[in-house]
Image: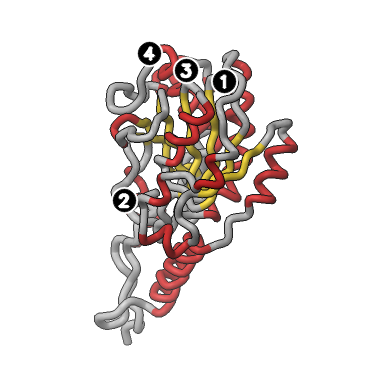
Amino acid sequence: MSPPTRPDPWRGLRSLTPARIALGRVGASLPTAEALDFALAHARARDAVHAPYDAARLADDIRMMGLSPIEVESAAGDRATYLRRPDLGRRLSADSISRLSARAAHDVAVVVADGLSCTAVHAHGPPMVAAIQAGLAAAGLSLAPVVLAHQARVALGDEVGERLGVRLVLVLIGERPGLSSPDSLGAYITFGPKVGRFDGERNCVSNIRSEGLSHEAAAFKILWIVREALRLGLTGVALKDESDLEALAAPAYERPVRGPAPANRADPAENIRGTGGSEPLAGP
């Protein structure tokens, strides 16, 4: 008598990819365990979008690094408005504008934004800020007060950077959750920030999480792009990320650790998101 669940002959490939393959079947349906696993992944993705943004906790983490945080909000007054009106998430609220003004000249501003995954920002925002702070100091670049942005889209960083009068803005933002990556952080780098910048004028390093790009590897890429952007006076499609060439030229013990191999059960699309010049169409 044959078993009720027929194993898929592709099962051996599951160790080579995080994609949902070789799930098996029961008649014409998925096995119960796989259906429940899919439902759990979907629930985690939804929770990441709607989880409360803990600005106080992030501010405490930033102060422990010896940095000064500034809290701002976008023109989207609540989460429902933020999700329905992406345009409002790209502009500062009137109250937030009054908190930002040009200060002592700085090279770089870092914006830590909730985006579409507060889970990602809470988990990876502080360690990424710490790594970026150390890298900027080593390069002799000054860092403006860290801005914590609520209900924010990527382009909010343009207005923040313009009002702070910095040469370049880096936005660390929670990415649109996938079915295996509810905690993925993205980094968007824009030279000469000002309202009206196009997505093609930015560089992006994405999939920053424990199963993707490690904090160390992401910081290495980001800092390489920042240095090149300030040297060349541009970001976006005209600036190609060649940080891997620099990493390969370094001794093995100095190369950044990219991170562990991704676990099973991921969207195939998640594996092709690395660096690019613009934010995803349905992203932050």
Of the pair 260 and 114, the residue shown nearer to us = 114
Residue beneath disc 1 = 106
> Which of the two labelled residues, at mark 3 and mark 2, occupies the earlier sequence position?
3
Q: Position of residue 216 (x, y in %)?
A: 56, 32
Binning the other alpha carbons within 10 Å of mark 3 as few (below 14), some (14 to 19) or many (20 upward) gives some
Q: Position of residue 244 (x, y in %)?
A: 41, 24
Binning the other alpha carbons within 10 Å of mark 1 as few (below 14), some (14 to 19) or many (20 upward) gives some
> Which of the two labelled residues, at mark 2 and mark 4, occupies the earlier sequence position?
4
Q: Is residue 164 above or below residue 121?
A: above
- Is the C-beta separation of discs 2 and 4 under 8 Å? no
For the residues carrying marks 1 and 4, which lies nearer the camera in this image?
1
C-alpha separation, residue under disc 3 versus residue under disc 4: 9 Å
For the residues carrying marks 1 and 2, which lies nearer the camera in this image?
1
Residue beneath disc 4 = 232
Report the residue at 35% width, 61% height from top: 20
- The circle on residue 269 is 2
> Which of the two labelled residues, at mark 1 and mark 2, occupies the earlier sequence position?
1
